Every structure is written in structure tokens, then in C-alpha cells.
Image: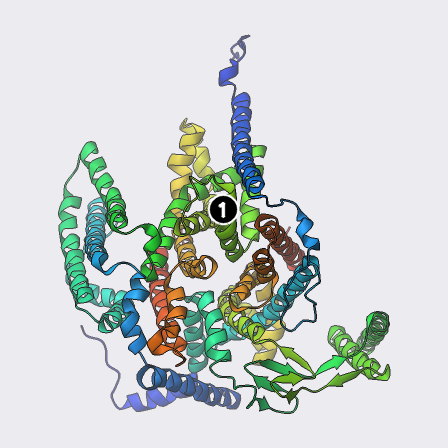
Amino acid sequence: MVSAPVSATRVPIWRNVRVLQWIFQLLVLLFAVLVLAWLWGNYQTNSERLNIPTDLGYLDNPAAFEITGNSMSQNAPVRTALYEGFLNTLRISVAGIIAATLLGTIVGIARLSQNWLVSKIATVYVEAVRNVPLAIFVVAGLSAIVFGVLPNIQEAWDLGFLVASNRGIAVPWFEGGTGGGLLLLGLAAAAVAWGVARWRRSVSERTGEPPRSGLFAGGAFVVAMIVGWFALGYSATLPNVDGRRTAGGIRVDPSFFALFFALVVYTASHIAEIVRGSIQSVPKGQGEAASALALSGFQRMINVILPQAFRVAIPPLGNQYLNLIKNSSLGAAIGYYDLTLVTQTTVGNGSPAIPAFALTMVIYIGISLFTSVFVNIANRRLALVER
Amino acid sequence: MTVPVTGKSGSGAGAVTWLRRNLFRSPLDSVITIISAVIAAWVVYKTVNFIFVTGRWEIIRRNEKLLMLGRFPEVHVLRWSITAVTLAGWGGLIAGILRARQIASGSIVPDAPFSARRLGDLAARFWIPAVVVLLTLGLASSSGPWITAVLAVVAAIAGRLIGPFIGRVKLGRGANATLYTFLAVLPVALYFYVVDAVGFDDWGGFTLNLFLAVVSIILCFPLGVMLALGRRSKLPLVQLVSTAYVELVRGAPLFVLLLLANVALQFFIPASLAPSKATRSIVVFTLFTAAYMAEIVRGGLQSVPTGQSEAAKALGLSPARQTGLVVLPQALRNVIPAQIGQLISLFKDTSLAGIAMGLFDVLNVASAIPAQGDFRGQGLIGETLAFTALLFWAVSYTMSRESQRLEKRLGVGTR
């Protein structure tokens, strides 16, 4: 077959697909830019009209408020307050993620338990909690549990090492220890931990026992830190009731406690479903093989099924962690000074609203991106290598 | 029905076997069973005790209108009743038409209308919301809600019975379009009917939560689909714009966005357009949910085999038609359950609007009424929060159960 001669006339420009595509793209971009420019223009004119600054100069103004449970002075700049709020967001997020993962994993395993009662309890927990807004748990955590269940400071539950009242829960904490000394101590403890890990590995190579170097190194680090702490002359205090407040130790603010409770209970119900799904995705033969090797039920779960389940679970778990971090902003509703409440308060004290909220948003997006990068790395390292 | 009955003498032994197999498998298992039985009994006791003994539900009884409708003026509440009854009839009508059309097209096998199986099925599906509705009615202080509820049930049944007659008739194109337009316009007309009497800003209570969720999920849909298509587009600029939007919005907390909209929207939008608080929250919910919707739809687009768009291309369809007529319908069908999941999550998130913007939604009412003169200082917030949680729970739980049922019927993941 002879191909027809290619016609010399070119495709007219208004029918050339590539040209049309570029025109379309430019229109989309133009539209996006126009919308942004319109918003930005309105913002500029309105700010000028109301004489509100649009830069980040407010960061140097005095914050003029105190953060409960923090020594920050009223004259500290907004910058410092924001940093403290950021730390508080990190605190609640890290504590919440760890606790929610533990509780969620337990509940997820319990839902698949052969024990009828255990699996029913887990099911009721998940179905009851998942379908109720987090905001209700947050409000209930503060008003019904902290103020409803915990006693007044006058009749606080004083267990010696723990003082619980509606002013918060106080636990023993370390005192003293500053910059340089602390850093040296940390380095020394890390060196001890490293030595212990090496020793475990050599033992493992000689005897064939499992090395468990992470466990041993972690334990050695903690022990070295504590021993070094007191060897350097620092101290620790127990909490006790002192009039209308607690002295000594460290007091966990009621709002932290309420927010922690709400975030953990709520997120755990979602994590439980993820864990259940990923355990079910592990081929049945794996569990049967583990039983055939005479592993106990616990060993089978910990050594065979869970490691494979978590491989599947990591991406959705990462999503839940991101949700938990973002949901921690609800602490603002009950007076937990996280990033959101600090921003809200500084805006109330006269900081310009848009730069302040924009900065907060950027920080949250930064935390989210950082977390998802972290999750992606974990996912890549744990994923099965397929052809 | 004849079910083979196992020997009666064996039932006792069966129970023992069952117990041994499910509760007392090993010594450790027995210990766990006993511990969890104690905990469960304690929780059940506390709950029952709270509901029937210690709970003082007078506060709910007295404030039920506030919880349900907010500060909606008493004179105009009738408009909500008429709306509710009409919507019930509308829902029944649509269900009837759809079912008749499905039977006509042969996609489902008709069944006797009042068979015990179907009634039992209905009861299993809807007993939870029915109980909650009855409970709410039981707490009502006037006869209005009762009359509304009875009329709504009557309207729903009537619509469901009339629907099949309309559905069975072969309609021409024009008539069909008229029918669909009528069905689509009716809720909008009802909205204007209510808003005509009382401005949107004075709506409140649980109705506001429902309304915010439904309106935002509908409004976010076109934007979400566009963003999903944009993100999968081969055109780099379009992809860049969509991806940037989706990732930025998903990285920010909804609560902070609502706070921002509360204080800052007036800077971005000229004063003449500056919307009221309730409208602002709809804008935020829509823009926020669109990003999540985009990800859901993108998942659906990925689940459609490439062969489908290739086949459409081979038939000579233009790219727009390939997407609009072949790929997108399949993609959207595949993600209906995920979309319902998003609706549930949005519905729960509407409670944030009350906290962030001071809207008088149900949670805000529930935290405010324990401070009323008659109830101050009695610590009744447990009761009001429990009632609010029950409302949210009943709606969300029913929706998620229905979505699971739909998932099974659509056969997602099995074909």
C-alpha cells in the first residue's frame, strides 16, 4: 500500500491541539492569578483603609498575655509566645500520636479476638466513638471529666507521687540542669547506649540470641540519663499540695489532659479500623505457619502478623497522624495554648489578623509536610521490594 | 419456613460449648474475659444509671426547640414543619421512581411489596434513627413535632407508593427533563420558602448542622471533580494549580481556616459582598471539602481501567466526551461510599463552626444552656452533651451503615 502524500498544508493554528492546550493552560493560570490578584488587591486596599499593617512586624510587639503552666513573661515578644505555642502543639501531637497508636492497635487486635466479649467491646467502642464529632469529646473532656470527676484542689487525690485535682495532674519531675551540662549528659548517655548496642550485637553473633539492641540501648540511655542527672547534683521533686495550688513536680494542665483524652480516644477508634483492616490483609497462611512453628498467640501476633500488617497500615496511619496534628488546633476551644490559641490571643491583642493567621497556617502546613515526608520515608523503607 | 432444629436436649450442651469456645478458651482467656466483663458491666451500669436515674433530662425537654432549631422565631416554625413533610414526600417519591426504573431495566428483581423479609430488612436498617426520632419526640413539649413526624411518615409512604407509577411510564425527553428539574428544584424552593421568613443567619441548632453539611457537600462537588481532573491532566500548568490547591488546603487545619474566615474574610472580599457568618462557614466548608473530594475522585479515576478511555478514543469520542461520558461516570460510581464517608466527616466537622465562628449550632447550644438561669450551677453539661452526641451518632452511624450496604450492592472491588 502506498501511503497518501502528506498534505503540505499545515494544521491551521486554531485547530492545532498543542496550541489549544497551551491556550487552555494559560487561561487556567490567568484565572488563578486573577483570583489571587483580586483577593490580594482587596486585602491591600482594606488594610490601608483600616490602617492595619500587612507585614510580620507584629512579631516583635509584646505579647501581653500569659500562657498557663509556662514561665513566659507578659513582656516577651509575640515571637516567643508563638514559639511556646508551637512547642505545645508538638507536645500534644507527639503524646497523642504515641498513645493513640497504642490504644488503637490494642482495640484493632481486640476486634479480631476469638474472645466474643472482647471483640464485642472493641466493636462497640469503635462504632460509638467514630460517629461522634471530636469537638464533643474535647468539650466533654474538659467540662464533664476534668470538672465533673476530678476533685477540687482542697480535696485533691494525693497519692504521694501524683496529685490529681481539677487544677491538673501533677507528677514527679526533674529540676535543675541547664544548657551545656544537659547537652554533655545527653552525649555521654548516648555514648553508653551506643556501647551497649554494640555489646548486644556481639553477644548475638556469638550465642545466636536475638540482639534486641534497640531495647537495650534505649534502656541504657534512660538509666545513664537518670544516674548522670543525680551524679551531677541535679534533683527531682515530688508534687504536693501547697494551699490552692500544687508545688513541685510538673503539673499537666487540665486543658492538656482534656485535649489529650479527646484526641486519643477519637483517633484510636480510627486507627483501630486501620489496624484491623491491615491484620486482615495479612495472608492467613502466615498465622497458620506461625502456629505450626509452635509460637504462642502473643509471639504470633508480635513477631509474624503485626510487622506485616504495619507495612500495609503505614500510609493510612500517616493520614491519621496528620489529622491528629491538625485536630490538636481544637485545643484552642478549651484554653490549651497551642499554636492556634496563641495566634487567636495575639490577634485579639492587636496583632494584624491576616499575617498572623497566614503564618500559623504556614507553620501547620510545614508540620504536615514534614510529617508526611517522614511517613513516606518509613513507608519506602518498610515496603516490600517488588520486581 | 422450616429450619432444621437441632435436638432440644443438645441446646444446653451447645451453650456450654459456645461459652468454652468463645469466652474460656484458655486460662489466660478466662482471666481476660472476667476482667473485661467487669469493666463492661461497670460501663453498662454507669450508662443505664445515667440515662434512667441520675440524668436530669428536664433541661433537654425545656430546650429542645433551641437544640433543634436554634433561635428560629416560634411564629415561623411551621415553615420547617411544612419543609420536613415535603422533603419526606420528595424522598419517598424519588425512591419509588428509582426502584420502578431499576425493575424496568432489569437491574433488580421485583419482590412482594410487603413481604416479611423486606419489612424486617427495613426495620434492621432504620430502627436506630427511628428510636432516636421517637426519643426526641418524647422529649418534645408541644404537639407540633408529633404532627410533623406523623405527616412526614405519611408523606414518605405516599411518595413511595406514587413513585412507581411515574417511574413505570415511558416518558419522552421533554417530560423526563421536566420531571428531573422539578425534583431538583423542589429542595431549593423549600430553602427559599424558609429563608424568606427568617434570614439564614438566624437559623440554628441541629438543623443548621445538617443544612451546612448537605449544602457544602453539594457545592464542593463540581470544584472537587475539576480539581481531580486537573491533577490527573497531562497539562503541566493545570496540574500545578490543582495540586498546589489540594495539598495546601489538606495541610491546614479546618478549625484554623474557620477562625481565619471569621476574622479575615472581610479583608479579601469587598464590603458589599462580605457574607454573613453562616455563609462564610459554607464557603470554608466547601473550599476545604473540595480538596478532599478531589482526592477521592482522583482515586476513582485511577480505578477505571485504561482500556475504557482507550475504547472511547477508538470510538472517535472527543477528549471531553471520553471523560464525561465514559470515564467519569464509572469513576464517580466507584467512589460513592467514599463520598458518603466524606459527607459524614463534614457533618461531624460542622460542629466546629459553632466554636470558631459563634454560630448557634447544636454543640454551641448544648454548651450554653447549662448556664441558663434555672439550670445554672447544677453541672448539667453531661446531659446536654450526651444528647448532642446521640443526635450526631445516630445520623452518622445510619449513613455509614447505608454506605456499606450501597458498597455491597454496587459491588465495588468485586468486579
Residue A288 seen from this side: no
| Of residues B58 and A198, the one drawn nearer to the viewer in this rendering | B58
Q: Is residue A73 left or right of residue B45?
A: right
Residue B350 seen from this side: yes
Q: Is residue B340 left or right of residue A375?
A: left
Quadrant where the N terminus of chain B sits is: bottom left
Question: How many numbered marks are there?
Answer: 1
Q: Type of residue at label 1?
A: Leu
The x, y position of residue B9, in whole percent, is 26, 91
The x, y position of residue B162, in whole percent, is 13, 50
The x, y position of residue A273, in whole percent, is 48, 66
Q: Quadrant of residue B362?
A: bottom left
Please tell me whether mark 1 sits on a helix, a strand or a loop: helix
The x, y position of residue A279, in whole percent, is 53, 68
Which of the chains bears the disc numbered 1? Answer: B
Rendered position, A219 above or below B90: below
Q: Quadrant of residue B363?
A: bottom left
Find disc 1 in the rendering and name its residue.
B265
Q: Is residue B242 left or right of residue B344?
A: right
**Coloring scheme used:** rainbow
Rendered position, A170 above or below B210: below
Q: Quadrant of residue B368?
A: bottom left
Q: Residue at x 65, y 91 (%)?
A: A160
| Of residues B8 and B128, the one drawn nearer to the viewer in this rendering | B128
> Could you classify mark 1 by the number of other residues whose Cα lies within 10 Å: few (under 14), some (14-19), or many (20 or more)?
many
